[in-house]
């Protein structure tokens, strides 16, 4: 049976809460009025019983102001207007009414001595009423909380289910935890169904991504391995000087292609068998990246100063780190004009800073390449850093470029 909509349930819950509180307050006020009436009658009867058999009347009428009780005579002779008057000190209530006499006024006096509660008793009644009001308020608050909790219980239940799902490591069956059918056909059910279908699509995408990267890793690396083997065989043959240069170019291109394949596969993977938590030394990878890219400086009179002020050990994906710093080194080596060295590679405890000089054309190209002033290689470095929790920034000015990777 479909549930009512969430909006209707909240409206009904609010209405029931208001009705319940209104009834409770109405009954409380009705009881207070009836109790006050009974109390006045009981006090009058008690006063009469105390004076029995000499029954005195608390309510009396006077046609002449001179016959009024002493405290009221002076006031009555001043000719008060018609209406109701109270004399607290004398414990008297007086009504001035029209009459057929010389002054055209008559007086009805109600002696409330012994009928009205004493001041100390009034304080106790005020305290009691305050307590009743507080209890009703607490009951109303509790009722409101209970009713609203029942009204929004499906939303809380759905939120608890979603919180229990590890969104960073989705599995193929996580969408089944939602069970949108148990939430009915109201707004919560629609939301639960949308979340369930979305998680199902994401889980399927993760499975396809893992299958693709696994297959692509094998299919792309196999021809690179074949080419590398063929290059090694050629290097062992008797080659002319021009053939040696050609084979050397093939070997470098193969290494670059291998690095590019590993770089894109590393970015494409959602997870990589826990390698993102591995500890490794930074210095050997920096030296390796510099050595692999030195051929880019062939024919350039540019020196490379590698300064290592520490031997940091960081946590992350070592292959991703090597790819990142290789791109940083390659960009520095490619952009530095002939004779505009040195290129400085500074390694400290918490960062790697690579600084190189550039020409005017290179500055303009870097500043126009992308919204962050980064080329393709440095954009990939940014992606790798985000995967591993590192920070990367690039600073370009008229004379030099500074690329910094910190951890």
Image (spheres, rainbow, N blue to C red):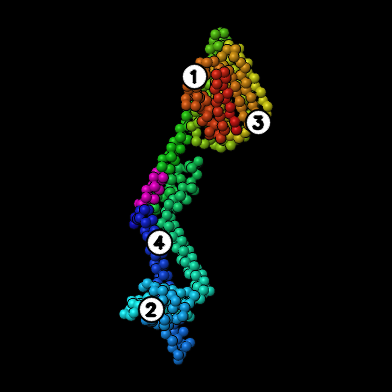
4 or 3: tag closer to the N-terminus: 4
Quadrant including the C terminus: top right
> In percent of the image, x 48 and y 69: which residue is there?
129
Q: In the image, which is nearer the foreground, mark 4 or mark 3?
A: 4
Helix, strand or loop: magenta stretch? helix
2 or 4: tag closer to the N-terminus: 4
Residue 383 place in picture, x, y as percent: 51, 30
Secondary structure beneath dot 2 equals: strand
Say which of 372 and 407 sits in front.
Answer: 372
| Residue on which disc 1 sits | 365
Q: Is residue 1 visible?
A: yes
1 or 4: tag closer to the N-terminus: 4
Which region is colored magenta? 184-197
Residue 194 falls within the magenta-colored stretch: yes
Determine the CA span between mark 1 and mark 2.
106 Å
2 or 3: tag closer to the N-terminus: 2
Q: In the image, which is nearer the foreground, mark 1 or mark 4?
A: 4
Quadrant including the N terminus: bottom left
Residue 71 place in picture, x, y as percent: 47, 78
> In percent of the image, x 50 and y 24: which residue is there?
373
Say which of 25 and 227 sits in front.
Answer: 25
| Residue on which disc 3 sits | 349
Up-down relation of residue 9 to residue 372 (above or below): below
Determine the CA span between mark 4 and mark 3.
63 Å
Q: Which numbered disc covers residue 195?
A: none
Residue 308 falls within the magenta-colored stretch: no
Q: Which numbered disc covers residue 17?
A: 4
Rendered image quadrant of residue 340: top right
| Residue on which disc 2 sits | 107
């Amino acid at each position: 049976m479909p549930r009512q909509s969430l909006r209707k349930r909240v409206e009904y819950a609010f209405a029931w809460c208001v009705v319940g509180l209104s009834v409770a307050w109405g009954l409380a006020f009705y009881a207070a009025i009836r109790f006050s009436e009974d109390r006045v009658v009981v006090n009058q009867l008690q006063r009469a019983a105390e004076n029995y058999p000499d029954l005195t009347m608390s309510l009396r009428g006077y046609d002449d102001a001179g016959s009024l009780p002493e405290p009221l005579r002076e006031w009555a002779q001043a000719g008060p207007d018609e209406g109701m008057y109270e004399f607290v000190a004398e414990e008297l209530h007086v009504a001035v009414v029209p009459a057929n006499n010389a002054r055209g006024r008559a007086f009805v006096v109600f002696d409330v001595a012994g009928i009205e509660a004493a001041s100390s008793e009034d304080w106790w009644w005020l305290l009691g009423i305050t307590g009743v009001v507080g209890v009703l308020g607490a009951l109303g608050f509790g009722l409101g909380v209970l009713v609203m909790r029942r009204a929004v219980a499906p939303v809380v239940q759905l939120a608890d289910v979603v919180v229990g799902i590890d969104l960073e490591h989705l599995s193929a069956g996580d969408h089944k935890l939602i069970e949108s059918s148990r939430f009915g056909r109201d707004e919560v059910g629609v939301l639960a169904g949308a979340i369930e279908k979305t998680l199902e699509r994401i889980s399927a995408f993760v499975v396809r991504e893992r299958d693709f990267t696994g297959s692509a890793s094998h299919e792309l690396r196999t021809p690179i391995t074949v080419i590398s083997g063929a290059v090694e065989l050629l290097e062992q043959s008797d080659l002319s000087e021009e053939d040696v240069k050609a084979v050397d170019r093939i070997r470098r291109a193969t290494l670059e292609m291998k690095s590019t394949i590993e770089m894109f596969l590393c970015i494409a993977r959602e997870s990589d068998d826990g390698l993102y938590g591995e500890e490794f030394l930074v210095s050997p990878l920096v030296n390796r990246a510099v050595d692999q890219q030195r051929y880019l400086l062939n024919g350039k009179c540019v020196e490379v100063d590698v300064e290592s002020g520490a031997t940091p050990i960081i946590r992350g994906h070592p292959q991703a780190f090597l790819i990142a710093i290789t791109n940083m080194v390659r960009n520095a080596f490619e952009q530095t004009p002939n004779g505009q060295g040195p290129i400085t590679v500074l390694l400290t405890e918490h960062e790697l800073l690579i600084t190189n000089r550039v020409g005017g054309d290179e500055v303009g190209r870097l500043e126009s390449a992308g919204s962050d002033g980064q080329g393709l290689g440095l954009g990939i470095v940014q992606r790798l850093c985000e995967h591993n929790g590192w920070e990367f920034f690039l600073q370009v000015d008229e004379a030099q470029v500074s690329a910094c990777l910190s951890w």
